Image (tube, rainbow, N blue to C red):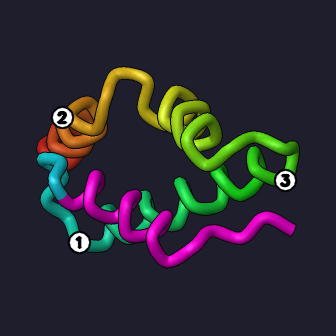
């Protein structure tokens, strides 16, 4: 089984925490979602870096700012 190291999780958390996403709950959910997606790819034999890149493309291909904009849009309507 391919488990993420503490350093891997910290890397993911730092990137998400530097984004414009303001909700702490959403950040935690994204960190968890990324970790799960990355672990699944690593089980297939991919490196952490390749797994992260693939997860990023699947979860937020247009970046974290898009998630922030969509959240603000949904919350204002």
Q: Which residue appears at 55% of the width and 41% of the height?
A: 49
Query: Which residue matches tag 2?
Result: 69
Q: Quadrant of residue 31?
A: bottom left
Q: Residues within 10 Å of mark 3 (few under 14, many from 20)?
A: few
Q: Quadrant of the C terminus?
A: top left
Q: Residues within 10 Å of mark 1 (few under 14, many from 20)?
A: few
> SS of the residue at dot 1?
helix
15 in relation to 26, above or below: above
Task: Say whether residue 68 is left or right of residue 47.
Answer: left
Mark 1, mark 2: which one is toward the viewer? 1
Give x and y (percent) for residue 12: 40, 58
Q: What residue occupies the far bottom of the structure in this picture?
A: 6
Q: Earlier in the sequence, mark 1 or mark 3?
A: 1
Mark 1, mark 3: which one is toward the viewer? 3
Distance (Cα) linking label 2 and label 3: 33 Å
Distance (Cα) linking label 1 and label 2: 16 Å
Q: Which residues are magenta?
A: 1-17
Query: Which residue matches tag 3?
Result: 43
Was residue 50 drawn as part of the magenta stretch in this picture? Answer: no
In the image shown, does 75 or 35 lie closer to the viewer?
A: 35
Q: Which residue appears at 16% of the width and 54% of the height?
A: 18
């Amino acid at each position: 089984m391919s488990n993420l190291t503490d350093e891997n999780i910290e890397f993911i958390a730092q990137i998400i925490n530097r984004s414009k996403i303001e909700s702490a709950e959403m950040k935690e959910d994204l960190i968890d979602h990324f970790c799960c997606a990355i672990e699944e790819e690593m089980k297939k034999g991919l490196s952490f870096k390749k797994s992260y890149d693939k997860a990023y493309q699947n979860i937020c291909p247009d970046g974290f700012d898009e998630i922030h904009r969509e959240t603000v849009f949904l919350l204002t309507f």
